[in-house]
Amino acid sequence: MDKPAATDAFEAWTWEAVCADPHLRDLPFKIELNRYNQIVMSPANAFHSRYQGKILRLLERLLKGGECMPELAVMTADNVKAPDVVWASKAALKAHEKEKINWSSSPEICVEVISPSNTRAEIEEKRALYLESGAKEVWVCSLDGKMSFFAAAGELERSALCPSFPLRVKL
């Protein structure tokens, strides 16, 4: 039987091991791996969850020709990250249809909802990682629902992929 978890201080976690470990399945945290194959956990809170759900529903209603998903595991240059919400075109869904554990690249839109525990540096790093791994846009929702939109060239006034998305999400 394969051992699912890293059991030795020098043994690295893999995303497959994280997903298979029964001890990690029902944690109330978002789990990611960093470049050192260490598990990084972020606690969830009610405001974060509400913004995440609202953004997903708005995006799903406003942007056709694809699919919205919460916390899709995406491989980046700093290992597996899970944007709070993503939107993937039908072409991206088709390109990744055989990837059952995590996607090898980011879908077109990756959204991060800020939590009180996030640092500016962490969000900027994730933004760069998602863009580097193929996202066309990265959106950031602040603690008060203000949306910021970014592409490889920098900050946008509004989303180019979904221009009708509101500049502030109201709960």
Image (spheres, rainbow, N blue to C red):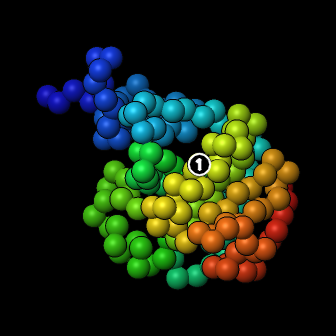
Q: In the image as oriented, which residue stretches furthest toward the left? A: 1
Task: Where is residue 59? Give x, y as percent.
Answer: 66, 70
Quadrant into which the C terminus falls = bottom right
| Residue 60 found in image quarter | bottom right
Amino acid under label 1? Glu
Q: Secondary structure at mark 1?
A: helix
Task: Where is residue 41? Give x, y as percent.
Answer: 54, 32
Q: Is residue 105 above or below residue 89?
A: above
Q: Is residue 165 visible?
A: no
Q: Is residue 78 above or below residue 18?
A: below
Quadrant into which the N terminus falls = top left
Task: Where is residue 164? Give x, y as percent.
Answer: 75, 80
- Taking depth in this image into account, of 58 and 37 the one nearest to the observer is 37
Taking 155 as reference, is 18 left or right?
left
What residue sits right under mark 1 in the picture?
125
**Residue pictured at 35% horizontal, 41% vertical:** 15
Taking 159 as reference, is 108 left or right?
left
The crowding category of the residue bearing disc 1, from other C-alpha atoms within 10 Å (few below 14, some 14 to 19, many at least 20), is few
Q: In the image as oriented, which residue stretches furthest toward the front? A: 153
- Taking depth in this image into account, of 67 and 151 the one nearest to the observer is 151
Q: Is residue 46 above or below residue 154?
A: above
Q: Is residue 100 visible?
A: yes
Number of marks:
1
**Residue pictured at 33% horizontal, 32% vertical:** 13
